[in-house]
Amino acid sequence: MLSEWLDWTLDGVWPDTASGTLPSARYTLHAPGVLELEPANCAPHAHACIMSAAIHGNETAPVELIGQLLSAIESDALCLGAPLLIILGNIPALRAGTRFVDTNLNRLFRHDLDAEGMEPDRARELMAQVDAFYARHAHLTPLHYDLHTAIRESLYPRFAVATRGDAPTDPAQWRYLAAAGLQAALYQQGHSWTFSHYSKHYHKAQAFTLELGRVAPFGHNDTAPLAPMLTLLQALCRGELPDEAPTDGMAFFHVEQELIRHSAGFSLCFPEDTPNFTAFEPGTCLARDDQAGDTRVEDSPLHVVFPNAQVEIGARAALLVTPAPCPSPSRQASTHDSHQP
């Protein structure tokens, strides 16, 4: 049934029954693309786990990872030990193989959202599903991994984005992610209203956006480098303590500025195929905007992440980042928001 669920979601099929039992869990289909698995027995280290994918419809590797998880649970190769909410975000875009249909879903996750349209309606539906799931499992630490792939090459193909929030990041999370093969992390201080930020901001979850390589169509993803990430997701599903690795092998960055497109007359001053994390020296012109003028690197080099000149007016066209210290457990534990450098 769980393997068929992915096909049903893409085909727009609603099964005759929306709930049932598996060897170690009970499943419930709450809405299109929203599947909850409740373990028969909750393990001692369980979190209330949300794993989401396809918030951008052309990012298919995370969907394939989730398919492997569900197949293992259904076959009893993986014994579920934690409540799990699986979300496929932008289903029409996933069917079309496009990033979005009308607007970027991953900028809409805020309680005061008043926009209209398919993606805003889906954002409201998903926010309600997240709220209800965490309320049902309020005795457990909330966790949300929002799985993505990037639209361009990257000097660090697998990296995490940790956003602002009042809840401290558990120092162990960085060690889990290091063991899962992540190579870098960004600390983002401003509100970004992404899906993972929603869980962190409103529910104090351990929440990250995880970039797991580059965009590719179904069947064309190189999933071999993602085997350690699958191991981490499996451990969380079992309610076990995941493997750990030292974080000194990861590169950490602090977001200094969000580069915003303010007008139709906007362009980036470097090639479109420039990899994420490329550094630019002081004096370099990064962007030109008819309204905001030129954006130049000032005193210290800046690295560019997520550059995209084709975003909507008013949207983020790039993150400008600088290297940050590797977080130490003692430092993380002593700060109000532990991911702040």
Image (tube, grey):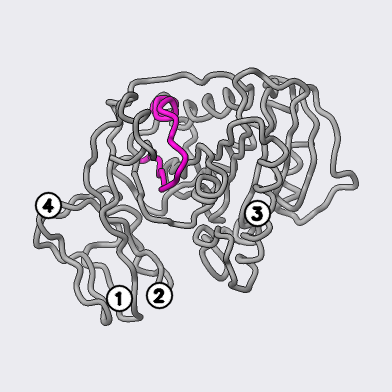
- Residue tagged 1: 266
- Magenta range: 157-178
Precedes in sequence: disc 1 or disc 2:
1
Precedes in sequence: disc 3 or disc 4:
3
Precedes in sequence: disc 2 or disc 3:
3
The x, y position of residue 187, in whole percent, is 34, 44
Q: Secondary structure under badge 2? A: loop
The x, y position of residue 105, in whole percent, is 55, 61
**Which kind of residue does numbered mark 3 sit on?**
Leu
- Residue tagged 4: 300
Image check: 69 left or right of 209? right
Question: How far apart, in angstroms, are the residues tagged by discs 2 and 4?
Answer: 28 Å
Within the magenta stretch, is there residue 73? no
Question: How far apart, in angstroms, are the residues tagged by discs 1 and 4?
Answer: 24 Å
- Residue tagged 3: 126
* Mark 1 nearby-residue class (10 Å; few <14, some 14–19, many ≥20): many
